[in-house]
Amino acid sequence: MQRILRGSVISMLVTDGKDKTRPGLAESSADAARIARPVGLAVGMAVGLAAAPANATALAPQEENNRRGTAVLELPPGQTARADEKPVGEARRKLQVLAVEDDPTEIELTMLALQRGGFDAVYAAVQTREEFTERLHHADYDVILTGYNLPSWNGMETVEVLREEGLDIPVIVVSGYLGELKAVECIKQGAADYVLKDHLLRLPDAVGRALREKKVREEHRRDHEDLARSNRDLEQFAYVASHDLQEPLRMVAIYTQLLAERYQGKLDENADKYIHYAVDGATRMQVLVKDLLAFSRVGSQGAKFRPTDCAAAVEIALRNLHAAVQESGARVECGPMPAVVADPTQLVQLFQNLIGNALKFRGSEAPVVSITAEQTKQEVIFSVADNGIGIAPEHADLVFAIFKRLHSRTEYPGSGIGLAICKKIVERHGGKIRVESQPGHGCTFRFTLPGEKVGDLRTPR
Amino acid sequence: MHLPVHSARREGGGLTNTAIKTASEILLVDDNPADLDLTHEILNKSGQHLSVNTVGDGAQAIAFLHRTGSYAGKPLPDLIVLDLNLLRAHGRDVLSEFKANPEFARIPVVIFSSSQASSDINRSYDLGANCYVRKPGNLFDFRNVVRSMADFWLGSASLPQKET
């Protein structure tokens, strides 16, 4: 039985291996190989169940109604599905296997299947958790092949050990028949695949797929890290740029102002005008650079999150806005506020910018600003509503863009950074912000901060 | 008891400086000639009785205090106004060098820098700066700040007395 089994495994792997086509293999043979692959599987199963003869072509009659079956016969001249032949044009892949198995014969069979499947496999065998962990510390393995229930160890615990060690090595369970439930359970626990001992010819494929999946995972991880790094770099750039721009800009501003002071009326009218433009431009740019710096600081210089009393944040924001509230004759109402886990300084800035915005874009009546909070299971929904000039719905997203202004500087001063900072603060906390409005009917800014209830509600004084 | 060599020299220098009751000596250290010019000009118009020396980098500032090379015979300043971002020898290094030397340690150092970074501010005080003033971004404020600096340090404050 073993002799036959080996032979059939080998013959099937010949066709099976070719789907890992390398350049240089004729296209027709690649096609043939791709088509032939499932036959290998089918035959392998037949072998496993019925101890069929070792030659693949001998099984072809069983498949004669199957279009794929004929594909075996379409192998290009010079390539035959012979048992002892290696795949043509196939670069063999090195594979370091860590086998968790106590039966040397099983390991040998497994390794043979891998060899015949196009892998130059070398292995180390372990039987206990201690041996396994020890091995992991001393070498890099491509794949773990483990039995399901060994006398000395439950092979599924390999997954647990790998997790503890922070290693991403695919685990393939190679076992006798387990039944669907247990097989599914293995996958659920984190095994990459499950291969029956009787169907070892499927193993190279399973290993190939597990390695590909790992590669994809690694690429994702790398992409994610790249993205995080590029975000950090961008923030750093904005910070450095705005910081370093301030110094030369200070010179331009001061010396154009000095020029204006000393030579106003001593040159001609045009000169006065040009100096005024230069002073104005430099001053404006100073504001932009300062704001850009503030914006970049939200991400780069933010504090750690800690339980923060939103009522206190509103109180501080209102204290900072005292002059603007007095000047506009505004009435600010605030409902009970929860505590959230947040950056306290940024929370104050968030409320301050939103309330300040409501005061600034007021209509003909005295501003009325209403602040509320609603705690749901996973988040708190805040709203800051006003009776100001409102925003056309088509501009609702624009208002959060950096340096985006909907009005001229003469109508409403400012560089257009306030709401961009709000958005950045909310997003840094994992929340969302949006505005609902109709022109002339005020607007309501709503933002969410994720998190369960931290403390009791409190109404700001 | 150990008496540092420097302090003996200082006493000698102090004698000549205080003998003729002259203007307060101010040393401006800044690698930006525009800031040097403007600060110098505003100080001169401040109404305080003062005399200003300027140097353009950290190494020159150190040479000036040691009165070596072309600075031989220069007076020891009563007040140092020091920028942080200097070429050769950073302002921080110049500051710590001044404060580590018993001959100069007493001389008040006003850090005058455009940096608002809390790390720059705190580090300066840690190293013994007597005051940290941020360079304003417009002429009006710049003038006010330099004037009030002169008024306070040369008018209100009692500076260390040169030993006789």
Image (cartoon, coloured by chain):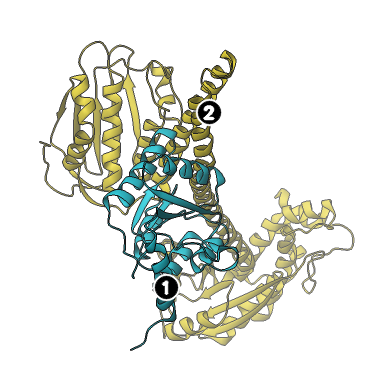
Chain colours: A yellow, B cyan
> Label 2: how many residues lie within 10 Å, few (<14), some (14-19) or many (20+)?
some
The residue that appears at 86% across and 57% down in the rendered structure is A76
Q: Which residue is mark 1?
A: B12
Q: Quadrant of residue A49?
A: bottom right
Measured from the top left, where is residue A441 in percent x and y? 27, 13
Mark 1 lies on a secondary structure that is helix
Quadrant location of the C terminus of chain A in the rendered image:
top left
The residue that appears at 34% across and 61% down in the rendered structure is B125
Per the model, the C-alpha gap separating discs 1 and 2 is 46 Å
Q: Which residue is mark 2?
A: A259
Q: Is residue A53 visible?
A: no
Q: Vertically, is A352 above or below B150?
A: above
| Numbered badge on residue B50 | none
**Is residue A90 shown left or right of residue A303?**
right
Q: Amino acid at mark 1?
A: Gly
Q: Amino acid at mark 2?
A: Leu
Measured from the top left, where is residue A445 in percent x and y? 30, 27
Q: Residue furthest bottom?
A: B1
Q: Vertically, is B26 above or below A88?
A: above
Q: Are marks 1 and 2 on the same chain?
A: no
The residue that appears at 61% across and 68% down in the rendered structure is A203
Q: Vertically, is A40 above or below A355?
A: below
What chain does mark 2 sit on?
A
Please state which of residues B61 and A8 is positioned toward the viewer in this rendering.
Answer: B61
What chain does mark 1 sit on?
B
